[in-house]
């Protein structure tokens, strides 16, 4: 029995209409989506001339009965929805019944298909008109050949880019889908040569390695979160592994690749203060929500969605990302009492560090044991099944920064017996007085003292008084460069930088231990506030790899 029906006009009208076929990659996307909807296990994509001359997509899916093979080519003919209600609970990638009609209208198209039972069918279409259809022998599945895209629309054809560019777009489309369906095998050939061979796998990491390169794998953190039937999962890069563009970001909603503002905002927000400006993490995130909670019918190419419970979705994703990025460097967090006790103790200059309130120092032996310092700058430590090389300045910067951030608005400081009087350039004085409130709440108490002079009455414990002038001058520079909203963060980052132990400073064993312990309690140990790496970890695997064991 035929399954495809032409949608009634009142449903068809409610479908976000639009020209979906712009270039070979759009054809590849629609055909591969159809193959996935037909529950295929293997999908082969063959391209000639970047897809401009010929595109063939073959699958081993359900196939179609003879009548369906012809119906499939009509506009609004689909087996995936029946009436308006179905539009609100889409479980398939396609649903508009437009793609095959749209492709066949602008190319010479041949479908060869056979369902599990029954005969095979071949249909030839040219510029939207069925030329011929025949019963043929064929393997189970569907093969769609699209030749001479835009042969009847010379203006559109002229707009296509060179073969290499079109090929790149086609590959990107296939990779996006390959990441979302690791259990499906994807193969791509160009002009007869294999460019992609992605055998089916149950393990997403295997697929990730194949798509992103194996070297990315050690830099990935697992993400997982769940609330009220919504699930987010996937992998994101450690803040030390970034790219200069957002091309390594892949977001999916219910198996569909999307470009979604809400999700990308949650992602970039999670990395704020951890990676340098203008850089982007690598991320593959899958969000699954009940189909009725998401409207995929808002954009012709279906790459945009609308969430009915946007706040809950944002919250779920943001929390899961925070969880992944703040997984402690060392062991589980200890109990509250344990933390309280440890905070009392400590010795050495590092005691002045405003250790943050959450996370744990741990009463148990620290798992990272300092072995020594090299070049007066790096701490070498052993533990957690490997070796750690820590940049002492970057680590201390991160610790101070998070301490300031946690105590936002009530940072205690040391009162100076005699106020420190600092003369400044007029512009610097001007901008600093505008931010007195933020400076005071970060522990630096200032008051105007004449036309371009400030009196410093109290300083945060980790700032040395002879550094205050340099700090204020640099801060004035940075504040004048940016927007007001970021002032606090700039103050914290610069205070942290000034207050942190410098390179070329010998440290005692206790100081090193203290630094490692404090580092283990911060929520984002991987990078300093400017986004530089804090440590390099060489685990057993990595050491064995390097020594060829
Ligand atoms: N590879 C395929 N395998 C099985 N059936 C297919 C395949 N491609 C298309 N079809 C059938 O043709 C119909 C129309 O496809 P299409 O024009 O892409 O619309 P949609 O995917 O939105 O339903 C689909 O609903 C499906 O029943
Ligand atoms: Mg489709």
Image (cartoon, rainbow, N blue to C red):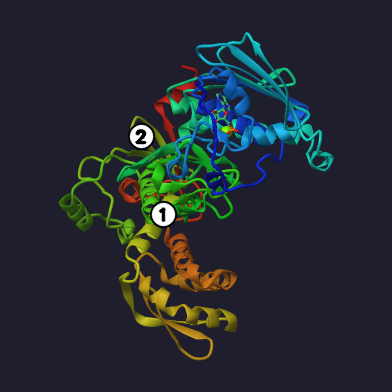
Q: Which residue is mark 2?
A: 382
Q: Which residue is mark 1?
A: 310
- Residue 137 as seen in the image, left or right of residue 128: left
Task: Classify mark 2: helix, strand or loop.
Answer: strand
Task: Classify mark 1: helix, strand or loop.
Answer: helix
Q: Local crowd at mark 2 within 10 Å, few (<14), some, or many (≥20)? A: some
Q: Residue 2 in the image: state x and y as whole percent.
A: 52, 23
- Image quadrant where residue 130 sits: top right
Answer with mark 1 or mark 2, whichever residue precedes in sequence. Answer: 1
- Residue 105 as seen in the image, left or right of residue 446: right
Q: Local crowd at mark 1 within 10 Å, few (<14), some, or many (≥20)? A: some
Q: Residue 5 in the image: state x and y as whole percent.
A: 54, 32
Q: Residue 351 in the image: state x and y as whole percent.
A: 30, 58
- Image quadrant where residue 54 sits: top right
Q: Is residue 244 visible?
A: no
Q: Confirm or reject: label 1 Cβ below 8 Å from ligand 1.
A: no
Q: Tell me what residue is drawn at x 61 percent, y 33 percent.
A: 30
The residue mark sitting in front, 1 or 2, is: 1
- Residue 310 as seen in the image, left or right of residue 354: right
Q: 234 or 511: which is nearer to us?
A: 234
7, above or below 14, in the image: above
Q: Tell me what residue is drawn at x 41 percent, y 53 percent.
A: 308
409, above or below 274, in the image: below
Q: Tell me what residue is drawn at x 42 percent, y 72 percent.
A: 465
- Give ligand 1's quarter of the image: top right
Q: Tell me what residue is drawn at x 78 percent, y 39 percent.
A: 160
Q: 272 or 172: which is nearer to us?
A: 172
């Amino acid at each position: 029995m035929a399954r495809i029906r032409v949608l009634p006009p009142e449903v068809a009208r409610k479908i976000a209409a639009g020209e979906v076929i712009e270039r070979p990659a759009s054809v590849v996307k629609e055909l591969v989506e159809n193959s996935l909807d037909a529950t295929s296990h293997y999908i082969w994509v063959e391209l000639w001339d970047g897809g401009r001359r010929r595109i063939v997509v073959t699958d081993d899916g359900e196939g179609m009965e003879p009548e369906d093979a012809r119906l499939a080519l009509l506009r609004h003919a689909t087996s995936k929805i029946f009436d308006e209600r179905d539009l609100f609970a889409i479980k398939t990638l396609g649903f508009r019944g437009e793609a095959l009609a749209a492709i066949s209208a602008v190319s010479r198209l041949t479908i060869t298909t056979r369902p599990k039972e029954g005969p095979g069918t071949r249909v030839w279409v040219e510029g939207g008109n069925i030329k011929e259809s025949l019963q043929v022998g064929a393997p189970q599945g569907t093969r769609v050949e699209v030749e001479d895209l835009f042969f009847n629309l010379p203006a559109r054809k002229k707009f296509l880019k060179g073969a290499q560019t079109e090929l790149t777009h086609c590959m990107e489309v296939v990779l996006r889908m390959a990441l979302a369906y690791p259990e499906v095998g994807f193969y791509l050939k160009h002009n007869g040569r294999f460019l992609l061979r992605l055998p089916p796998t149950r393990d997403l990491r295997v697929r990730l390695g194949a798509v992103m390169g194996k070297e990315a794998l050690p830099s990935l953190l697992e993400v997982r979160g769940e609330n009220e039937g919504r699930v987010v999962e996937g992998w994101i890069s450690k803040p030390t592994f970034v790219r200069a563009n957002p091309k390594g970001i892949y977001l999916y909603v219910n198996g569909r690749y999307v470009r979604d503002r809400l999700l990308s905002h949650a992602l970039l927000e999670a990395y704020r203060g951890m990676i340098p400006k203008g850089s982007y993490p690598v991320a593959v995130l899958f969000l699954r929500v009940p189909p009725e909670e998401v409207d995929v019918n808002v954009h012709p190419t279906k790459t945009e969605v609308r969430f009915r419970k946007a706040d809950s979705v944002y919250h779920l994703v943001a929390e899961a990302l925070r969880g992944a990025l703040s997984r402690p460097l060392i062991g589980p967090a200890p109990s509250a009492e344990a933390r309280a006790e440890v905070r009392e103790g400590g010795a050495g200059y590092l005691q002045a560090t405003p250790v943050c309130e959450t996370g744990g120092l741990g009463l148990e032996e620290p798992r990272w044991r300092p072995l020594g310092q090299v070049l007066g700058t790096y701490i070498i430590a052993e533990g957690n099944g490997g070796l750690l090389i820590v940049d002492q300045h970057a680590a201390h910067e991160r610790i101070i920064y998070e301490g300031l951030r946690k105590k936002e608005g009530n940072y205690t400081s040391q009162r100076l017996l005699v106020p420190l009087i600092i003369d400044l350039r007029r512009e610097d004085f001007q901008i600093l007085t505008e931010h007195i409130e933020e400076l005071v709440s970060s522990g630096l108490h200032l008051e105007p003292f004449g036309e371009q002079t400030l009196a410093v009455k109290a300083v945060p414990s980790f700032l040395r008084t002879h550094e205050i002038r340099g700090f204020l001058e640099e801060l004035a520079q940075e504040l004048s460069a940016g927007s007001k909203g970021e002032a606090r963060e700039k103050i914290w980052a610069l205070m942290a930088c000034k207050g942190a132990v410098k390179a070329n400073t010998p440290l005692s064993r206790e100081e090193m231990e203290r630094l490692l312990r404090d580092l283990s309690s911060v929520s984002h140990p991987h990078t300093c506030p400017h986004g530089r790496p804090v440590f390099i970890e060489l685990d057993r695997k990595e050491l064995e790899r390097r020594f060829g064991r």
